Image (cartoon, grey):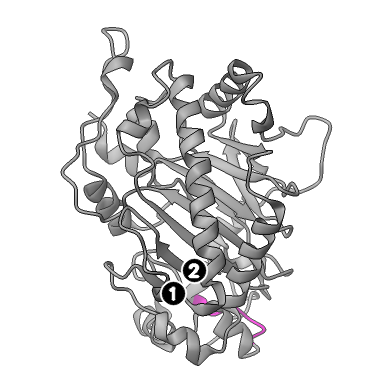
Amino acid sequence: MAATGAGDSLTENFMAYDRFQELKAFDESKAGVKGLVDDGITKIPQIFRRPMEEIAYGDRISTKLTQTQFIIPVVDLGDIEQKRDNVVARVRQAAEEVGFFQVMNHGIPFKVLEEMLAAARGFHELPREVKEGYYTRELTRKVKFGSNFDLYQSKYANWRDTLFCVMGPEPLDPNELPFVCRDITMAYSDQIHKLGTTLFELLSEALKLKSDHLLRLDCAKGHCLLSHYYPACPEPELTMGTTKHSDPDFLTILLQDHIGGLQVFHQNRWINVPSLPGALVVNIGDLLQLLSNDKFKSVEHKVLANQIGPRVSVACFFTPHLYPTTRMYGPIQELLSEENPPVYQETTVQDFIAYYDSKGLDENSALTHFKL
């Protein structure tokens, strides 16, 4: 693949090359971004380059700490038995005002977190010919390796590879998982599902509903694990690890390593989400914002590309994904009134995901499409 340097003019004509053929060549290599790095590139291919006007606008924020820097809320779940009301209040404030929070003392052993990250990295660093067997864009595959689900829709490709695993509602056959990450993925999946159940109970109470309300809506019925791998990038200022977006699920729980780069948009600026040892990052998904009728916020976030790497993270999306169901989701009736009418129309999870995937990470919220 041709590699394009950073010294080109801001008026560069992006149509002067065959973009589709370059995308196709990258896709058919089945090697992902890591394959490019393994090949020794020193300039990123043009398909990964952000539009020059976006680069010139300069949306990368300084990572220097200041006295006034906003800190992502941290919720200590160790207090859940003795101080449940306080924990619910903290969760409510974070879900309503920020859309992001970190949880400590969540019950998943530190050793399990470390082993999950190591296994995720282990898969992505397998020989190319081994990973090729998992590479596909088939929607119905439960375990698949790929790079950029929206490769052919996005303005530019992201500097990221992903192992995508559908863990439920139907139990995944462990033999479908790569051997290098099989056992720990199954163990982590069980534990993260239990944590998700606890969080949905707290979020239900934060909405002043019975603790099992969101669970009875099947919010925790299915979940997917996405093991992301962000290789070191030779020109990080020209691309993104992940374009700004919100998540097409009810809730996301993220395990991240120490590299950093995750940022959340809050009060009209980008805020770093620091890596705290043993903590997990939680964010409200689009579907939970829809259910809560905008009481909870599904906010934009992104991941910066970095010269240091690889960065490894494992995201758990709570969603039945493409599992066939006729359940319709709309604003919860108990939250509606004359003063608080419904903001969204009802939709199925499948229709929501189909719309989200069709537009790709275009920096626009999928929720807008479902507003009344």
Amino acid bearing label 2: Thr
Relative to 80, residue 232 above or below: below
Relative to 209, does residue 297 appear above or below in the rendering?
below
- Circle 2 sits in a helix, a strand or a loop, which is it? strand
Specify the amino acid type for callout 1.
Answer: Phe
Q: Residue at x 39, y 32 (%)?
A: 289
Image coords of residue 372 (percent x, y): 22, 28
Query: So how many labels did they put on this image?
Result: 2
Where are the magenta residues, as a range?
A: 41-46
Nearer to us in this view, 84 or 275: 84
- Residue 4 coordinates in the image, percent (x, y): 57, 81
The residue depicted at 21 percent of the width and 39 percent of the height is 347
Circle 1/circle 2 CB separation < 8 Å: yes
User: Circle 2 is placed at which residue position?
Assistant: 162
Q: 147 or 113, which lies in front?
A: 113
Question: Nearest the camera: 145 or 299?
Answer: 145
The answer to whether residue 353 is magenta is no
Image height check: is 135 above or below 281?
Answer: below
**Residue that mark 1 sits on:** 145
Q: Earlier in the sequence, mark 1 or mark 2?
A: 1
